[in-house]
Image (cartoon, rainbow, N blue to C red):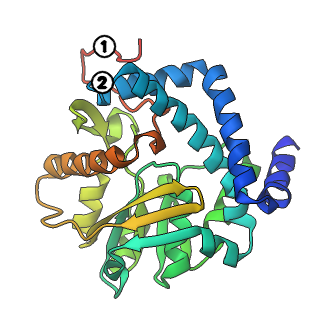
Amino acid sequence: MSARLGVWFMQQVLARLPLRVLRALGWGLGQVLYVLAAPRRKVALRNLALCFPQATPAQRRAWARETFVVFCQAWLDRGWLWAAPRAVVERRVQLTGALHELEGDTPTIIFAPHFYGMDAGGLALPLRTARAFTSIFSTHPDPVVDAWFMAGRQRFGDVRMLNRADGVKPILSNLRKGGLLYLLSDMDFGPGESIFVPFFGVPAATVPSLSRFARLGRAKVLGMYTRMTPTGYVAEITPAWQHFPTDDVPADTARMNRELEAAIATMPGQYYWVHRRFKTRPEGTPSVYQ
């Protein structure tokens, strides 16, 4: 019942608030969460220390505080992203950059890492292209929340959500038919699915799916990095990556991380630092979160 009430409140109350009011509410919640969610605060600060050792402790604390604020603001924004009239979403969510790369029917993978604007970016694509659009998801444990997520992410265009457990066949089938794949492959999914490549100079268990899907699907790869702004979101499409994929999966996966590092450097506080990105360690290496 609490989940149903929460979804109703997001859709019927928060979605109707002016954006400036919603963002102010998210700012306040983020400040509180930064203080109360001590374990996640420590994870964020540790990640930032590993990835930005040259930054001052004060700068890293500022980025960590920002990441909690933007997390809360992006969560509240799901109300209007998934329930407001289409015209509202189109006004607040912009798609920029190398938009010509989305034209035609060349199989295309959108590398869309975990910036907090990723759900807005996921709507920007079907709002502005008629191409079939596929994304991979993990089921939320609460069926009410899971249904809300699914409906929101599929509300515009021809969007197909594939469960991670369904395997690669439907993913490759859609790609080879000229579809778009929205791929979020920058999290630590454990040793079974990952290889170790550098991320900000630290060995990180990284899923090599971008290289493999691009090769098997004969697809070009674009980056899409979504930034939260005072007026909504801007999702920027990069030109197609040159000389990608290659026959060297570890080298391709290391390049993916380098591309992500460059994007993070433009908005360090908007990346998902609360994730234990370095949880999986090479054999015999102690945890970095002790």
Number of numbered discs present? 2
Q: Which mark is residue 31?
A: none
Residue occupying image coordinates x 41% and y 27%: 60
**Which of the two labelled residues, at mark 1 and mark 2, occupies the earlier sequence position?**
2
Asked where in the image residue 127 lies, by quadrant, the reply is: bottom right
In the structure shown, which secondary structural element does the residue marked by tag 2 occupy?
A: loop
The reply to whether discs 1 and 2 touch (Cβ–Cβ < 8 Å) is yes
Residue at label 1? 286
Quadrant position of the N terminus in the picture: top right
Compared to residue 167, the image places residue 201 above or below, namely above
Tell me which corner region of the image, top left, top right, bottom left or bottom right, holds residue 31: top right
Task: Answer few, some or many: residues within 10 Å of disc 2's Cα (few below 14, many 20 plus, some between 14 and 19).
Answer: some
> x and y percent of residue 244 in the render?
17, 63
Image coordinates for residue 289, horizontal then vertical, percent: 41, 17
Q: Which residue is mark 2?
A: 281
Name the quarter where the C terminus is drawn: top left
Indicate left or right for 253 with 118 as reference: left
Horizontal side, residue 217 vs residue 99: left or right:
left
For the residue marked with disc 2, what is the amino acid?
Answer: Arg
Q: Position of residue 178 (x, y in %)?
A: 36, 82
